[in-house]
Amino acid sequence: MGRLGLIGSGNIGSTVARLAVAAGIDVVLSNSRGPETLAGLVAELGPRASAATAAEAAAAGDWVLVSVPLKNYRQIPVAPLAGKTVLDTNNYYPGRDGAFPELDSGATTSGELLQAHLAGAHVVKVFNNIFFKHLLGLARPSGAPDRSALPIAGDDAAAKRQATELLDALGYDTVDAGPLAEGWRFQPDTPAYGVPYLKDPSQPFPEDPGQPGAAQVVRDALAAAERAKG
């Protein structure tokens, strides 16, 4: 099945790791504090999981998930990711990340920023539009009638195929939103951000039990997005 490297093992990273291990995929976890701080998570995940430095996780992965605060994206190691499919979960939250004028103006997207930093890699934006508890709870086998879909965006067709294969193994269908420049369609404050997977959109994400978000629901939400004027 291949191996998944993770740079960042917080809510989304650890959730994707759990889904991967359940699907028979080995995972190599890393974070900014060092491999020893991941001992508990590795023990919980079992023999398919190990911990390493970010550079080691990057080198080990057939896919590599980047799930760090956007303000830290320049710390992602470049050389070991050359030629690899990089799954970018990052979102721009100005209150946490500080101001990025190029994002505020709509001149670029968070995925394109990471792609520019990782010039030799193939970045696919994914996993950034779903609450981590819903991501874990809504995974379904291929062909299940209540299977959810996640949007992806990327500039490399082969990388998007690899991302789609991983999503299928993890329990999700895929909706292709287009190139990285279209990643804004499922960033925060858009109809595709979290809402397709909510049972009651009037409730905060953490309090909602979640419900399946079918591919057509996600497509409609992507189409309804309106870009803020910078």
Image: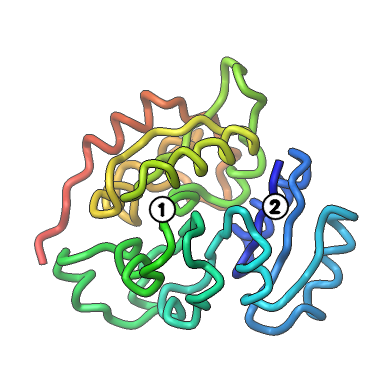
Given the image, on which type of amino acid does mark 1 rest?
Lys
Are there few (<14), some (14-19), or many (20+) residues within 10 Å of tag 1? Answer: many
Screen quadrant of the N terminus = top right
Callout 2 secondary element: strand
Please tell me which residue is depicted at 50% across the width and 50% down the height of the picture.
Answer: 127
Tell me which numbered mark, 2 or 1, is placed earlier along the sequence.
2
Work out whether 6 lies above or below 203.
below
Image-based side of 203 in relation to 1, left or right: left
Residue 63 spot, x, y in % from top left: 58, 54
Q: Which residue is mark 2?
A: 3
Q: Is residue 96 visible?
A: no
Q: Which residue is mark 1?
A: 125
Image-based side of 46 in relation to 31, left or right: right
Q: Could you say which is closer to the camera, residue 48 or residue 213? A: 48
Residue 225 spot, x, y in % from top left: 22, 43
Front position among marks 2 and 1: 2
Screen quadrant of the C terminus = bottom left
Inter-mark Cα distance, 2 to 1: 19 Å
Q: Could you say which is closer to the camera, residue 177 or residue 194? A: 177
Given the image, on which type of amino acid does mark 2 rest?
Arg
- Quadrant in the picture for residue 189: bottom left
Callout 1 secondary element: strand
Q: Is residue 153 visible?
A: yes
Residue 69 spot, x, y in % from top left: 48, 73
Q: Residue furthest left?
A: 229
- Quadrant in the picture for residue 54: bottom right
Image-based side of 105 in relation to 186, left or right: left
Residue 182 spot, x, y in % from top left: 25, 49
Question: Residue 95's mark?
Answer: none
Report the colour scheme.
rainbow
Are there few (<14), some (14-19), or many (20+) residues within 10 Å of tag 2? Answer: many
Please tell me which residue is depicted at 58% across the width and 32% down the height of the picture.
Answer: 168
